[in-house]
Amino acid sequence: MELKERIILGAFEKFAKYGIRRVTMDQIASDLGISKRTLYEIFRDKRKLLSDGMKYYSGLKHAEAEETIRTSGNVIEAIYILVKQSEEMKQKLNPLFFEDIIKYYPEVHTMSVSKSRDRDYNLTHKLIKKGISEGLFKRELNVGLVNHFFHVVMNILMNEEHFPREQYPHEEIFRNIVMPYLIGISTEKGHEQIRKYFEKEIKYRTE
């Protein structure tokens, strides 16, 4: 493992546990057993470390998602796994991480969201097309329109000014908004797979 990658992994482990602002560059260097000079030769400041780290983890997340789609038995199973992975990641992160990056490093947050949005857009486009080919999503769907609408809605739902997390947890948003949308674009065959994988997350009823 290269030193740059080792620094990113070590730093983000502390960021995830304590938040960004509470972790100093001195602490990162000390925990990794390297000199401050070495750390600053690779990352000129915490902002650069955070920026490069966000790019690194975004790349890992995308590669992991692509592998999940490739190896899953069907698109509903892939979505189920991706949702679970996202939930597990959020549980490992101190809420201070998100608060700090939005408040103290807004340009890093904006850059990260922008790059992730492009990748996620392509990923969900691929998922919808795969679902149609498997007979799980309705064949008559306008893939571009459905995908675009989904991301517009998700951008609104993830805006904490409109949907504060303490009032509307991610699980409730998923159960009450995302799942009904997924059911709406699915065929009967898709409904069977949704019941199979998401029976604990939703109250599903056929009429």
Image (cartoon, rainbow, N blue to C red):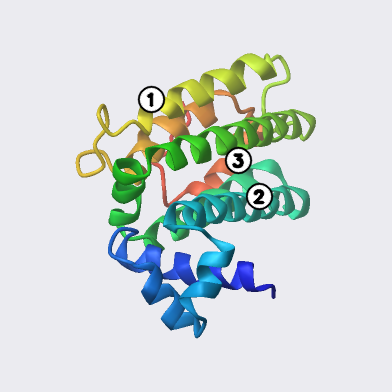
Is residue 15 visible in the rendered image? The answer is: yes
Q: CA distance from mark 3 to mark 1?
A: 29 Å
Which amino acid lies under the numbered mark 3 shown in the image of this protein? Glu
Could you say whether the residue bearing mark 3 is in a helix, strand or loop? Answer: helix
Looking at the image, residue 135 sits to the left or right of residue 173; the answer is right
Pick the front one: 67 or 186? 67
Write down the quadrant of residue 24 in the picture. bottom left
Identify the disc placed on residue 43. Answer: none
What number of labels is visible?
3
Which amino acid lies under the numbered mark 2 shown in the image of this protein? Ala
Q: Point out the residue furthest to the left here.
A: 167
- The residue where tag 2 is placed is 65
Q: Position of residue 15 (x, y in %)?
A: 39, 63
- The residue where tag 1 is placed is 156
Q: Residue at x 68, y 14 (%)?
A: 142
Which amino acid lies under the numbered mark 1 shown in the image of this protein? Ile
Q: Residue at x 70, y 52 (%)?
A: 63
Q: Earlier in the sequence, mark 2 or mark 1?
A: 2
Q: Residues within 10 Å of mark 1 (few under 14, many from 20)?
A: few
Q: Position of residue 69 (x, y in %)?
A: 71, 47
Could you say whether the residue bearing mark 1 is in a helix, strand or loop? Answer: helix
- The residue where tag 3 is placed is 192
Q: Of circles 3 and 1, which is in front?
A: 1
